[in-house]
Image (cartoon, grey):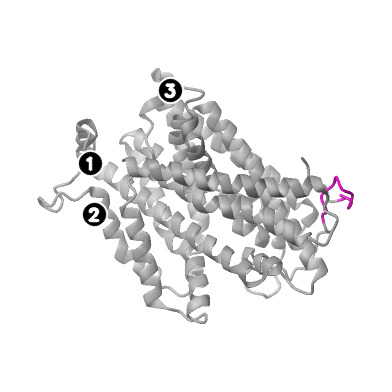
Amino acid sequence: MGFDNDASSSSNRLLIPPAMDDATCSNPLLTSSPHPLSSQTKTFANVFIAVVGAGVLGLPYTFMKTGWVAGSTMLFTISLLTYYCLMLLVYSRRRLEGNQACKIKSFGDLGYAVSGAPGRVVVDIMIVLSQAGFCASYLIFIANTLANMINHSDITVARIAGRRPITNFMGNLGIEPKTIYIWALFPFQLGLNSIKSLTHLAPLSIFADVVDIGAMGVVMVEDVQIYLEQSTTVYAFTTMSVFFYGVGVSIYAFEGIGMVLPLESEAANKDKFGMTLGLSMFLITLMYDLFGVLGYFAFGEDTRDIITMNLGSGLVTNTVQIGLCINLFFSFPIMMNPVHEVLERRFSAGEFSIWRRYTLVLGVVLVALFVPNFTDFLSLVGSSVCCILGLVLPAFFHLRAFKDDDLGMTWVVADVALIIIGIVFAISGTVSSLTEIISR
């Protein structure tokens, strides 16, 4: 199933409007002043930065639950579907801009162009839920990692005894280490989320991806060394009961769908954007799969929900874990910024609202407190929100954008099938993830 920029309007080919090279279709996060467009190399790097995130750290645990062959197959399938849906968004935007005297800069703009105010509302809701979900997962990761590093002996004893770990850090109150660390992060995040402009934090997004890639490299090297030193039992397939759980984590891992339209706008050679995006997605998927397989092969049934927790203590391991925590700590306000912008636009006439920001941060903290397992939460966010945002809406918007054209029965069926598949994944995956969370 390929995308061809020379596709005709016949019934068996996808209608693809010509690429628009107007540089005014700029990234809404940037100013509207003239600036150079991105080369293919820079576009490749930007796609990598937009997609790769903390979700990769839960893949080894997911492969343990699904089996490594099942997990790999699932990952590549979701990657292909994600790429297809990203291109649907690009082609829908090109079509609408070709027919209308308007510029579509974002996912929300596209929703408004095809379905009016309800379309933008749906996109806004999904973005708020997904971004807030990402931030809650960051807090879970940081708190669990710090607990594993600082309160390792308490956690080990608790796991052996089959009970929840507590710490003597606050006397005899019996509070879990994770709870203490999340509340300790709370005032600092209130401060960071009080910043009106995050321009000074922007370079940290690049630092975040450097840390992610470095951490993945260190973990994979450690995995290989451990695998060569010991024998573990691994399974290619497990049970169908965890299929939708794995789908949720896989979809979460390919975060960044909201950035595809700004990235395509910034590309100097828009006719080759699809090829650049496809190559980026393929290499990211290959890296993800290798990371998941090596982690599972190294630790087998002992694979933890955050793979770095399996590596024990040591200078390199501790440095990697601290680096990841710092990365996610400063990524939190950056990822919350779209949430603040959406809600302030809708409820504060675009004016800065400190109490609303504080309330949102508190809400994210409370969610993080009640979810014990990092990967379980990834699956929940991936299933409940990212399925709709990444599969259902692109297919629906594509149908709406081309409603006045002879799209052809084949592509109508493909779009409808994607909508149905996305809804099935969302409902089934949400139920599966909630079941895992509640059972702990």
Labels 2 and 1: the sequence-earlier one:
1
Q: Amino acid at mark 2?
A: Ile
Q: Main secondary structure of the magenta part?
A: loop
Q: Is residue 39 left or right of residue 366?
A: right
Could you classify mark 1 by the number of other residues whose Cα lies within 10 Å: few (under 14), some (14-19), or many (20 or more)?
some
Q: Nearer the viewer, mark 2 or mark 3?
A: 2
Residue closest to the eye, 87 or 201: 87
Which span is picked out in magenta?
A: 6-16
Residue 180's label in the rendered image is 2
**Residue named by callout 1:** 164
Instruction: Please check the rendered image and state whether residue 19 is part of the magenta-colored stretch, yes or no.
Output: no
**Residue named by callout 3:** 227
Looking at the image, the residue that sits furthest to the top is 231
At mark 2, the secondary structure is: helix
Determine which quarter of the picture holds residue 361. bottom left
Residue 342's label in the rendered image is none
At mark 1, the secondary structure is: loop
Labels 2 and 3: the sequence-earlier one:
2
Could you classify mark 3 by the number of other residues whose Cα lies within 10 Å: few (under 14), some (14-19), or many (20 or more)?
some
Name the residue at 89% across, 49% down: 10
Q: Is residue 283 left or right of residue 52?
A: right
Residue closest to the eye, 217 or 88: 88
Q: Is residue 258 left or right of residue 305?
A: right
Give the Cα distance between marks 2 and 1.
14 Å
Q: Amino acid at mark 3?
A: Tyr
Query: Residue 36, how many percent across, how many down?
Result: 71, 65
Name the residue at 62% across, 50% down: 391
Name the residue at 27% across, 54% down: 181
